[in-house]
Amino acid sequence: MRKDITIAAAPRATRGKNEARRLRVAGSMPAVIYGTGKDPVAVAVSPKEVSKILHSSTGHNTIFDVAVEGGAGEPVMIVDWQVHPIKGGLLHVDMQRIDLDKAIVVQVPVHVKGEARGVKIQGGLLELVNREVSIECLPNDIPEFFEVDVTGLGLNQAVRAGDLTLSASMVLIEAPDAVLVHVTALKAEAAPADAAAAGPAEPEVVKAKGKKEEAAPADDKKKK
């Protein structure tokens, strides 16, 4: 989804771990811009501005502009990023240039709406099987999400990718029979084995507490 956002980027002349550390200390981070037949460009961008985009409602499907120092802004999408394993901050980001006149493949989130009849009345369990769906469309037609109404969904029924309503330039890439959400029966607890079939139970031997029985005295030797 296209957003009216522009992020400033500064060109990077050098690469490597030392340069990356220097950028992060200065409040920036390394990034790469590539795609549409042009040469990749190494730049530095603000991790805070990129993080805001990733945590927005459109997430990594957001199309925004990047303006490299001395140049005009061009539309891009975030296609890959690295996060610090402990602190959670962004370490690096890859951005792909987008041709607004060419269709692209994206993963769109699936949101569930309503309370399924199979859960409310029939005691089933609602399970979201696929949280995203692959479609192809023009960049400006990327939806924020697909909403699936499960109100009428009964026990052992499902909503599949082919049931989604597509508009504009959208084409389904996901397999049409891929299950998005379904209602399943709760698993019954294993019933105990039939006591009659198992045979009579062995009596439990209970040992008396206290001193051990003394050993019986040995037989006296026969007198000669």
Image (tube, helix red, strand yellow):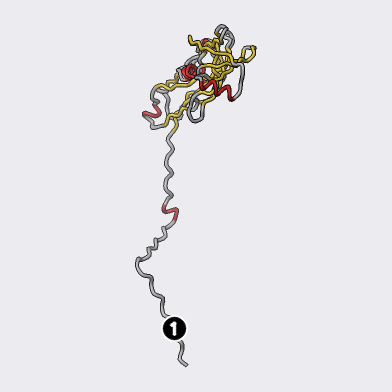
Nearest the camera: 108 or 181? 108
Residue at which label 1 appears: 219
Left-right relation of 189 to 71: left
Nearest the camera: 70 or 193? 70
Nearest the camera: 56 or 187? 56
Check the image and report above or below for 82 versus 199: above
Residue 204: % across, % down: 39, 61
Left-right relation of 189 to 97: left
Q: Taking the image as drawn, is residue 145 in sight?
A: no
Instruction: Give the total of numbered labels.
Output: 1
Tell me the quarter of the picture where residue 208 sits. bottom left
Q: Taking the image as drawn, is residue 29 in sight?
A: yes
> Residue visible at 41% across and 76% down?
215
Tell me the quarter of the picture where residue 44 sits. top right
Residue 31: % across, % down: 56, 18
Q: Secondary structure at mark 1?
A: loop
> Residue visible at 38% across and 25% down?
115
Q: Residues within 10 Å of mark 1 (few under 14, many from 20)?
A: few
Residue 26: % across, % down: 51, 19
Residue 220: % across, % down: 44, 85
Q: Amino acid at mark 1?
A: Asp
Q: Residue furthest bottom?
A: 224
